Amino acid sequence: MSLLEAYKEVVPPGTVEFLILLAEKVQGKRILEINSTRVGGGVAEILRSLVPLFQEIGLDCRWEVITGTEEFFNVTKAFHNALQGWEQNISPQMLQSYREINRENAARLSCDADYVVIHDPQPAALIDSRPPGGKWIWRCHIDISRPQMKVWNFLRQFVVKYDSAIFSLPGFARKLPIPQFLIYPSIDPLSDKNRELSTEEQGRILEKLNIPLDKPILLQVSRFDRFKDPLGVIQAYQLVKKHHDVRLILAGGTATDDPEGEVVLSEVREAAFNDPDILILLLPPDAHLEINALQRAATIVLQKSLREGFGLTVAEAMWKGKPVIGGFAGGITVQLVYGITGFTVHSVEGAALRIHSLLDNPELSIEVGREAREYVRQNFLITRNLGDYLALMNYLG
């Protein structure tokens, strides 16, 4: 069975046939995807599935990753925080370091392709070294609706040189002199993180992780990042614990381009106060089956982000038929249609109240989970993402 044929089992009818028709218009084209890490984070996961699909439909698609010093990734983490609205102290030396590392990567990488897709701020300055020909697309995965203007103005000087830009939500777009497009991120329903697991397989994985199943599980899967608000999740759990005997699992890790992860993880461990019902799992970037099993074992899944580009862990849990409570932030608001496919909250108290409600009403949890899975099928699978890219490439010519 070909890769596309396998998707026919789970995606909406006619999807695969439509992708084949779109691909006919761009046969023989070369695509280059560039980001800042091959492991950790939603961008890497999307590319891991998207690149083989491009190849499956007859396109020459490559995936390259920029390299950098610790200083460079400290700078780009500060950029990330500033672009999402947290005031940062950005020095001229930091800006110079950013330019230099991008110039070094431009000299190392071959960027000759018909379509070059640059993901997020880290490699954005590669545009200054673009070769002749080809269409360059800047794909922004983060929420830049309220950026620190000094950082945005610095980044904007590179973005305006692209042929087009892609954002995850209309509200993330900025005033630019180039065409802008909306493409939602997506999950791969056939990946190890999202494929079906047998009861036996799930049991073996949970046993290996030492996860007891003697009480309801509240779960948040995310990098240990302040924007994901793991401390707020612990506070919500502590409120719920006064009335319901539940267990909280915070599962995640750090990405190679995120130097703040260890600091936040330390804060989370301190906030847990040695509570035996708070399990903190530091998972490697390739722990896809483990995350799959944890999401399937969870009673309620949380993604209490304060800022969020999109939040693919929300779609992952929805695909598994779980009720999800998310922060009212970014793409979470698109995925969770309040009271139908999930719930969004604005505070720790709001999260605790909604958890109480779902624990007291298991029938509601089942109904929300059923609606959530179908909503993901129609809107947030990798095949839809592939179709959006093919349509954009047809438009750009």
Image (cartoon, rainbow, N blue to C red):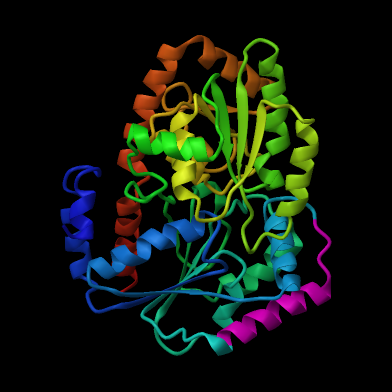
Q: Which quadrant would residue 375 be assigned to in this image?
A: top left
Report the residue at 40% width, 12% height from top.
363
Q: Quadrant of residue 319?
A: top left
Percent x, y of residue 335: 45, 37
**Residue occupying the point 61% across, 66% down:** 121
Q: In the image, which residues are magenta?
A: 88-106
Identify the residue at image location x=55%, y=57%: 40
Residue 314 showing in the rendered view: no
Q: Quadrant of the N terminus?
A: bottom left
Magenta includes 97?
yes
Residue at image x 41%, y 62%? 48
In what quadrant of the picture does the C terminus appear? Answer: bottom left
Image quadrant in which you'd find residue 377: top left
Q: Is 223 a magenta residue?
A: no
x then y, percent, for residue 287: 50, 50
- Magenta stretch, main secondary structure, is helix
Q: How many marks?
A: 0
Q: Of residues 25 and 13, which is closer to you in this image? A: 13
Tell me if residue 56 comes above or below residue 281 in the rendering.
below
Q: Position of residue 164 (x, y in %)?
A: 46, 68
